[in-house]
């Protein structure tokens, strides 16, 4: 089992400190939810972990498979087994979903073995069909240009298909529920649930309880002011849904005083 262990992570964005000492352990095989109000640093954590150049790590470490991933390039972090599903996926006109996925898989293979000729087309097609069947996706989806003209739900399903094809060990889902109606939310959640298991650790970043009605977390973390201030079981998310964040702000201010 591989853990992603984050220690005292501080991150600046455009000269402003957003993360102020995040400590978190995400275990392979578990689903963790990260909740918190807008502007508290949830997405900053996701982008910093994947190496976005606009997010400056000023202090702290993030260890996975014996390496501090903060010292690696984004593609190296991906090849190590970490995946980020974006809140706002970008459209790539002229590049089909299938070609995008095959290129991503071949890039990984080439990095591991410079002499690799790439995944054979019959093998790739078989794998892609199996992954799409697992996610209950129509096979014609693979021939569409990536995210071009996609609905919000289709964009998020394309992200989950990428996760299914690349088979990471740690997946970070940055507000996957953003902009989805209830039917799209259910479909995307079913895709995540189809992939969860002992080989995959998932961090679900969300504002709301509703996605957690479909993706049951093992652990829930609450972020306020750039730090994780509370950790508990799935009932913690239900408590937040009922009572909001004020009680937690008051508790945190009292402890900090």
Image (cartoon, rainbow, N blue to C red):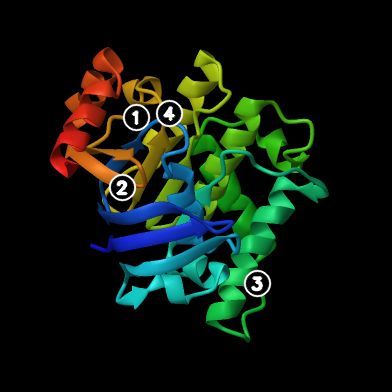
Instruction: From the image, state whether disc 2 or disc 3 is nearer to you.
Output: 2
Say which label, 1 or 2, has the lower sequence index: 1
Residue at image position (56%, 22%) is 180
Q: Which mark is residue 190?
A: 4
Residue 58: x and y in percent read 43, 68
Residues under numbered marks 1 and 2 in contact, where contact means CB atoms less than 8 Å apart: no
Q: CA distance from mark 2 to mark 4?
A: 30 Å
Horizontal side of 13 relative to 243 (left or right) equals right
199 versus 210 height, above or below? below
Identity of the residue furthest to the front in this view: 257
Instruction: From the image, state whether disc 2 or disc 4 is nearer to you.
Output: 2
Instruction: From the image, state whether disc 3 or disc 4 is nearer to you.
Output: 4
Residues under numbered marks 1 and 3 in contact, where contact means CB atoms less than 8 Å apart: no
Q: Which mark is residue 215?
A: 1
Q: CA distance from mark 1 to mark 2?
A: 24 Å
Kind of element beneath mark 3 = loop
Say which label, 3 or 4, has the lower sequence index: 3
Q: Nearer the viewer, residue 249 or 92?
A: 249
Q: CA distance from mark 1 to mark 4?
A: 8 Å
Horizontal side of 106 relative to 91 (left or right) equals left
Q: Nearer the viewer, residue 137 or 173?
A: 173
Q: CA distance from mark 1 to mark 3?
A: 34 Å
Residue 182: x and y in percent read 50, 14
Residue at image position (53%, 36%) is 133
Horizontal side of 240 relative to 176 (left or right) equals left
Residue 163: x and y in percent read 50, 49
Residue bearing the label numbered 3: 118
Kindly indicate the quadrant of the structure image that contains residue 250: top left
Kind of element beneath mark 2 = strand
Q: Which quarter shows the C terminus?
A: top left
Say which label, 1 or 3, has the lower sequence index: 3
Residues under numbered marks 1 and 4 in contact, where contact means CB atoms less than 8 Å apart: no
């Amino acid at each position: 089992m591989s853990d992603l262990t984050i220690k005292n992570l501080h991150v600046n964005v455009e000269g402003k400190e957003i993360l102020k000492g995040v400590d978190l352990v995400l275990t392979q095989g578990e689903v963790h939810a990260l909740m918190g109000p807008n502007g508290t640093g949830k997405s900053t954590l996701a982008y910093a972990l994947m190496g976005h150049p606009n997010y400056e790590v000023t202090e702290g470490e993030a260890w996975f498979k014996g390496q501090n991933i903060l010292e690696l390039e984004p593609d190296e972090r991906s090849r190590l087994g970490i995946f980020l599903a974006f809140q706002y996926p970008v459209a790539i006109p002229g590049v089909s979903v299938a070609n995008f996925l095959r290129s991503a898989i071949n890039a990984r293979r080439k990095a591991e073995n410079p002499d690799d000729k790439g995944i054979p087309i019959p093998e790739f097609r078989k794998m892609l069909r199996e992954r799409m069947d697992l996610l209950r996706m129509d096979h014609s989806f693979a021939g569409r240009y990536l995210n071009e003209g996609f609905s919000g739900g289709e964009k998020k399903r394309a992200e989950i298909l990428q996760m299914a094809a690349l088979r990471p060990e740690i997946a970070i889902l940055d507000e996957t529920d953003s902009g989805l109606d209830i039917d799209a939310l259910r479909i995307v959640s079913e895709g995540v649930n189809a992939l969860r298991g002992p080989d995959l650790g998932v961090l679900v970043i969300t504002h709301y309880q509703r996605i957690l009605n479909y993706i049951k977390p093992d652990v829930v973390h609450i972020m306020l002011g750039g730090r994780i201030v509370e950790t508990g079981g799935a009932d913690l998310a239900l408590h937040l849904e009922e009572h909001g964040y004020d009680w937690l702000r008051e508790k945190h201010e009292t402890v900090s005083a």
